[in-house]
Amino acid sequence: MIRILADADALPVAVKEILYRASGRVGARLVLVANQPLGHPKSPLISCEVVASGPDEADHRIAEMTQPGDLIITADIPLAARTVEKGGVALNPRGTLYTRENVKQALAMRDLMSELRDQEIHTGGPAPFSQKDRQAFANQLDRYLQTVGK
């Protein structure tokens, strides 16, 4: 059975809704990991694990829980790298799939941008979550689930 672990505190509602539907459609176990209880559809496939408050508590728990073959939903590139290292695959809410082949490059770019911000060089932030992002996420999730479901 496919297991999806979601870094749920900052996930857009649209992404959560896509995950709920996908879980039911393919029979995937969905675990929302968050700093507070989250409402979700009643389903034996969907659960919420509440962790202590703190900026990286959910990330640490997800990394600890990750097993080979798990799909991790997160915008946090360091978490994506940690889970890929353990044999998982990470999917960003904007539709980028992180694997062994590309996560190190994404982490290096994230670190570079962080250094620039630390030097007070304005790099801008991410654009607001859009319909295009929602569609890219849904498409990538469907492609991934079809691939592992074969």
Image (tube, rainbow, N blue to C red):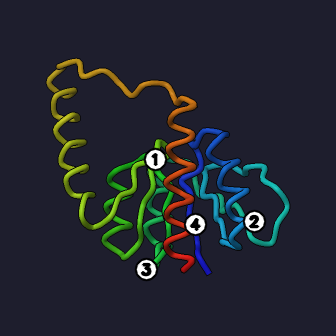
Q: Is residue 80 above or below residue 43?
A: above
* Whole-number angstrom distance, CA of label 1 to CA of label 2: 20 Å
Query: Which quadrant is the C terminus positioned in?
Result: bottom right
Q: Is residue 41 left or right of residue 37?
A: right
> Tag 3 or tag 4, which sits nearer the N-term?
4
Give the amino acid at mark 4: Ile
Q: x and y percent of residue 91 in the render?
A: 45, 55
Q: Is residue 18 toward the left or the right of residue 72 in the image?
A: right
Q: Secondary structure at mark 2?
A: helix
Residues under numbered marks 4 and 3 in contact, where contact means CB atoms less than 8 Å apart:
no
Q: Secondary structure at mark 1?
A: loop
The first of marks 2 and 3 along the sequence is 2
Please state which of the two labelled residues, at mark 3 or mark 1, is closer to the viewer: 1
Q: Position of residue 127 (x, y in %)?
A: 43, 25
- Can you tell which mark lies on residue 4? 4
Q: Nearer the viewer, residue 21 or 71?
A: 21
How many neighbours does mark 3 have within 10 angstroms: few (below 14), some (14-19), or many (20 or more)? Answer: few
Q: Which mark is residue 24?
A: 2
Work out whether 74 lies above or below 46: above
Residue visible at 22% across and 35% down in the picture: 114
Q: CA distance from mark 4 to mark 2?
A: 12 Å
Q: Is residue 39 left or right of residue 128?
A: right
Residue at which label 1 appears: 95
Q: Secondary structure at mark 4?
A: strand
Q: Quadrant of residue 99?
A: bottom left
Residue that mark 3 sits on: 68
Query: Can you give x and y, in whole percent of width and height, for residue 106 in the image?
Result: 25, 49
Sequence order check, earlier mark of 4 and 1: 4
